Amino acid sequence: MPVADALAELLKGVTLCETETVQLADANGRVLAQDLASTRTQPPFAASAMDGYAVRAEDVANVPATLTVIGEAPAGHGFEGVVGPGQAVRIFTGAPVPNGADAILIQEDAIRDGDKVTATESPARGLFVRPAGLDFSKGEVLIAGGAKLGYRDLALAAAMNHAELPVRRRPVVAILATGDELVRPGTEPGPDQIIASNHAGVAALVEDCGGTALDLGISPDEPVAMAGHVRRAIEAKADILVTLGGASVGDHDLVQDVLGAQGMDLAFWRIAMRPGKPLMAGHLGPMKVLGLPGNPVSSLVCALLFLKPLIGAMLGKEIGPGVETEAVLASPIGENDRRQDYVRAELGKADDGRLMVTPFAKQDSSMLALLAKSGALIIRPPHAKPLPAGASVPILKL
């Protein structure tokens, strides 16, 4: 199945995670469930943008001009009187501009002597005055539903006077590694074993996308044990079950059979892509199932292309695998076969400032070190022709 068709099939029937309310301090990285409108106008009054003196612009049109200081307005304590002809009020940043004043004489342009202040510059009407509503108005929608909330959004939400925010529940993604050959990091492997790595990368990607990773551990290649792990995902009411390895056609690849025995409806299996051909998808009741390949690079590239958009769909947010753009080849690249290829490459810049990619000579799907060093994946469509250095190619920035 082509990559685009497989992704469309995977996203069919996805159910949005329900809305929950969280405290502002707990909303970082969460996805906003609905549009957020301001409950107030900001600033709520005309405010001084500088320390200085609130004056009438006409009184200081010709300088030097000496005015009488009749009071003070620090932030949080407005001056309740009226500024009349020949008068000024000492004012500080953020304080309300007193009635009668229409400009701020900054303190650098003022000479104070007792209750007198002399202006050495002429501020124009409105200078250094922030009008009411300069930033936003009450009722104005400032953060759209579906936004992944970051530090700027949370500062804005606080200014809008929201102490709590409606967000999507984080989808729970249960992750099950499979294979007799795998042991946990930090464990001494046997002579025929390797360290499991895919689960660590997939779990991190889940968290980055706004989900919650549930580590089911490593299942041996034994149907009863594997079925027990799957039941743990069902009991935990996971939204997605991700299996790692064991979904191919070998004698010890048991994942499809075990899931089928548990009632999984298989949507598709095998994708016309490299790395990652043995990708499996289906659903087990309301739980989506995504079977990723066992090879580390295949597993992580498939997680990027399929799991990331799936989590986004559950959060009501369209999340692509990354930034797709164009780059210039630094070296030639050969023709492609019938599978869409994602070629690991270094990312830099050409002399003219355009992005430049250098494909690695080796592309084995077991080589995690090359993936970690890659700045981009070169996207090679099926049956793509050879290209010389200097040709433009589509890339997925990592």
Image (cartoon, rainbow, N blue to C red):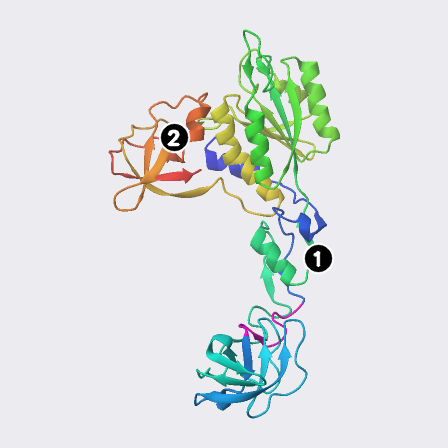
Q: Mainly helix, strand or loop, the magenta region?
A: loop
7 is within the stretch colored magenta: no
Query: What residue span does the magenta drawing correspond to?
Result: 40-51
Q: Amino acid at mark 2?
A: Val
Q: Is residue 326 left or right of residue 89?
A: left
The answer to whether residue 331 is visible is yes
> Where's residue 127, x and y in %?
49, 78
- Asked if the residue under mark 1 is in contact with the one under mark 2, i.e. CB atoms within 8 Å, the reply is no
Q: Which mark is residue 163?
A: 1
- Bin the neighbour count of mark 2 within 10 Å (Cα to Cα): few under 14, some 14-19, many 20 and up: many
The number of numbered badges drawn on the structure is 2
Residue identified by numbered label 2: 343
Residue at the right extreme, as displayed:
235
Q: Nearer the viewer, residue 214 or 131?
A: 131
Q: Quadrant of the C terminus?
A: top left
Q: Is residue 386 left or right of residue 339?
A: left
Secondary structure of residue under mark 2: strand
> Where's residue 124, x and y in %?
46, 83
For the residues labelled 2 and 1, the Cα–Cα distance comes to 46 Å
